[in-house]
Image (cartoon, rainbow, N blue to C red):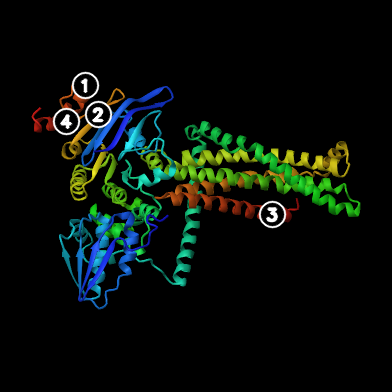
Amino acid sequence: MLAVEARGIVNRFGAQVVHDHLDLEVRSGEAFGIVGGSGSGKSVLLRTVLGLHRPNEGEVRMFGTEITHLGDRALRALKADYGVTFQAGALFSSLTVLQNVQLPMLEHLDLSARALDELALLKLQLVGLPADAGAKYPAQLSGGMIKRAALARALALDPKLLFLDEPTAGLDPISAAAIDDLLIRLRQELSLTIVMITHDLDTIFRNCDRVGVIVDRKLVTDSLAGIVDHPHPWIQSYFHGERARRFGVAHGT
Amino acid sequence: MHPNPDKASIHLTIVGDGETLCVTLGGHWRSREVGDIEREIDALDFSSHRRLRIIVGAVVPDLAGAWAVRRLEQRAAERGLSVDYEGERPVTVALVDAALGDAAAVSALPAASRGSVLSALGHRAFDTARDWRDGLAFLGEATVRFLRGVFDRRAWHPISVARHVYDTGITAIPIVALIAFLISVIIAYMGAQQLRKFGADIFVVDLVTVGVLREMGVLLTAIIVAGRSGSAFAAEIGAMNLNEEVDALRATGVQPIEVLVLPRALGLVIALPLLTVIADAVGILGGGLLCNVLLDMPLVQYVQRVDESIGDYTFWVGIIKAPVFAILIAIVGTFRGMQVRGSSRELGRLTTVAVVQSIFLVILADALFAVLFMEIDI
């Protein structure tokens, strides 16, 4: 079954065509990585799939429901089914971390104060934040903690589908590896489907089952083992460039 | 918004069997049902039972659902019942166990701190005093930077100053002119009503001229500019602060005061007197129009009377205040902007503070000017 399906997506900004009949398929239960050069339209693709941006052409289905023409109410109900983290965290700066996690719950659920507190705390523990981090404001957190807090907020409603925009960007290698471990664990424990935009080759090789690369305004999708041998020059230099050499060795290519 | 309008107990099927209370889980145990499940659990009557048997069946709870299952266990345990399962205890419940552990983690939740009135008062007084000290320090630093920059052509930033003259001055002309016109009409109208009783119609002209030139023109212009540009200064610099742009300036070796504060202050010092001149002119025009319509006063006579009523200092008494008000507005706006730290809420709060304080300071300064001018008899 397909968790996310986008067909024939066209996105234009003025004369600039970002996506030209792009197709995307994400299967239930898999971790799907989206890769592309800077300015290739990764974030626009994510915003399109999330229903934050209406494409010029094409359709997007999430769990089989077409969303590009959905009304506000139906879209709102659908938004409870997936969680999103943004590149810079996008935590609400005037709320504490705990309140950040509780905000989707308050908006979508009808819970007692006790349930709110305990469930939010549960999510914090789940992503490996100490309980006292809940009382802190986003400005008081380190980069790694912001990523974790954003993940906790994305998990607030127990979604089956998680969209992550650069989950490890800007972190030191140790913190980034810890986030990778966390994602692997969460995916097993909560049987999540994960769609992530990332540049981090570590994250791709450790977490992703399949990878989609945006080249020439289209998405080239293949399994991890298959994509590294794709002939396109950008993909070649991405997976076999200087920075990727150690992975190439590890994968025998 | 209620996901489950049917209040009937659909998640728990209860069979009381002597000592054992058998609860069969049903329906969906997911986050969006947890509110209802919680109410059903709280409504359960455990008295007269000693054992709780939870029959899981085909239910697969998600994390929130597992939390609810755990809550059911806890409620029973609190009332001294032993809990067992028919079938497997859902794995997600164990996950919640591991995450929440015992009550220690939950009790680590911060309690809202409530100090005494006295300590709150003390904090408030201390904060206010520190605020004034910081504000004065800021004014001092800006002054020193300005004096140093006077002899350094590179520190003048003429393009930046011009931009702020445009933003704070030129674009404000329509609203300033409109308000000056309306205010002078109000003064003339009120004056005409009262003075007509004494047959002293002609003094309406004096009232409008002196009132607008000495006080109203400059004061209203300053208040409008404080609302328009004081807030813009605070918000602009505050957003730069949130975005670490101010730190980036410092790291580049550029003094934020030199490039952010001084051009704004200088721009406003140029723009506000010019705006005041426009406000004065439009105000006198408005008064003339009303006198003509309401009192049938020929415009020639009005102009003549205006000329007679303007003393040596009338115009300058008003205009001399404009640069002072400009500095107050610019310093308060930029100072509050520089104070923004951490959150978007601070940005909103300090922008409000900037507007309120600059208007307050403008009116206070105006009052001091009035006393000063009375003392020196002009």
Q: Secondary structure at mark 3?
A: helix
Q: Are marks 1 and 4 on the same chain?
A: yes
Disc 3 versus disc 4: nearer the observer: 4
The x and y percentages for residue B373 are 71, 52
Residues marked 2 and 4 touching at CB (< 8 Å): no
Left or right relative to A79: residue B207: right
Judging by the rendered image, the residue that carries numbered circle 3 is B372
Number of labelled discs? 4
Q: Which residue is mark 4?
A: A244
Q: Classify residue B320 by image quadrant.
A: top right
Q: Please provide percent x and percent y for residue A102.
A: 35, 55
Badge 4 sits on which subunit? A
Residue B124 x/y as whole percent: 48, 64
* Same chain, labels 3 and 1: no
Secondary structure at numbered mark 4? helix
- Residue type, mark 2 in image: Val
Relative to the observer, which residue lies in front, B202 or A18? A18
In the rendered structure, are the residues bearing label 2 and label 3 in contact, judged by CB atoms less than 8 Å apart? no
Quadrant, the N terminus of chain A: top left
Q: CA distance from mark 2 to mark 3?
A: 74 Å
**Helix, strand or loop status at disc 2:** strand
B254 or B232, nearer to the observer? B232
Report which residue position mark 2 lands on.
A213
> Mark 2–mark 1 contact, CB under 8 Å?
yes
Q: Is residue B357 above or below residue A1?
A: below
